[in-house]
Image: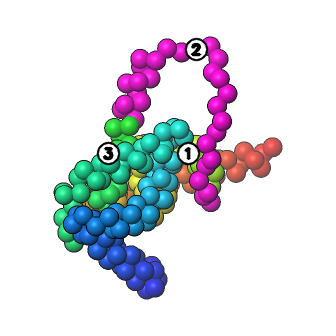
Amino acid sequence: MSPSKDLDQRSGEQELLALMERYQQGDREAVDELVRQLSPPLLRFFVYSRVPPNDVEDMLQDCWIRIHRSRHTYQAGAPVVPWVFAIARHTRLDGYRKRRRRESKEVLVETLPEVARPAEPSAALDPEEFTQLLADLPESQREVILMLKVSGMSLEEVARATSSTLGAIKQKAHRAYTKLRQVLERQAQQKEGR
């Protein structure tokens, strides 16, 4: 990591620490700034976590409600991003469980009406292609890749957010990268074989 990037991350984390402490004291401007800074990476996390597109915004809102309700549990001076993403992770898991319960009670119809697709967030990769690429990974590896590559978290932050050790996160990331490399090589060979 370059010294300037390291310095940018430290100053960014210091700003988040100050905002979080102000938020705990009831500063409305701090809340607005936290939402402005952290919503884009949270939104990307939910989009790339295979959350149905029509549920992404609701999940983001639910996550912020949970953050608000549990802001008193944040310990001053602790890194903010892992704390927030731990809440996001639980929000996503609870949302998945809720969808599964709802789907088990739904009745299938023969044809579905046309539904307009919501606008997709801008990203380097198409979310559908990226989601499809990650589909074969175990959930724990997919989650680590999403936090590292989509949300831009460090290994240490992912370890804190998932209540794992740094070694476990490195191992999951390495295994995921190996499997993704194999999938991409197979795809390249298939394209060459045409």
Q: CA distance from mark 3 to mark 1?
A: 20 Å
What's the residue type where badge 2 is placed? Val
Residue highlighted by disc 3: 90
Of callouts 2 and 1, the N-terminal one: 2
Closer to us: 101 or 136 = 101
- Badge 1 crowding class, 10 Å Cα cut-off, few under 14, some 14 to 19, many 20 or more, is some
Is there a contact, CB below 8 Å, between mark 2 and mark 1? no
Left or right: residue 8 compared with residue 67: right
Secondary structure beneath label 2:
loop
Left or right: residue 119 compared with residue 81: right
- In the rendered image, residue 42, in percent from the top left (x then y), is placed at 43, 55
Q: Nearer the viewer, mark 3 or mark 1?
A: 3
Q: CA distance from mark 2 to mark 1?
A: 26 Å
What's the residue type where badge 3 is placed? His
- In the rendered image, residue 142, in percent from the top left (x then y), is placed at 45, 48
From where the camera sits, is residue 32 visible? yes
Residue highlighted by disc 2: 109
Count of numbered marks: 3
- In the rendered image, residue 9, in percent from the top left (x then y), is placed at 40, 76
Q: Is residue 116 magenta?
A: yes
171, above or below 110, in the image:
below
- Specify the principal SS of the magenta part: loop
Q: Residue at x 25, y 50 (%)?
A: 69
Report which quarter residue 139 is drawn in. Answer: top left
Dividing the image into 4 quarters, which one contains the C terminus? top right
- On residue 131, the disc is 1
Of callouts 3 and 1, the N-terminal one: 3
From where the camera sits, is residue 20 visible? no
What's the residue type where badge 1 is placed? Thr
Highlighted range, magenta: 96-124
Q: Nearer the viewer, mark 2 or mark 1?
A: 2
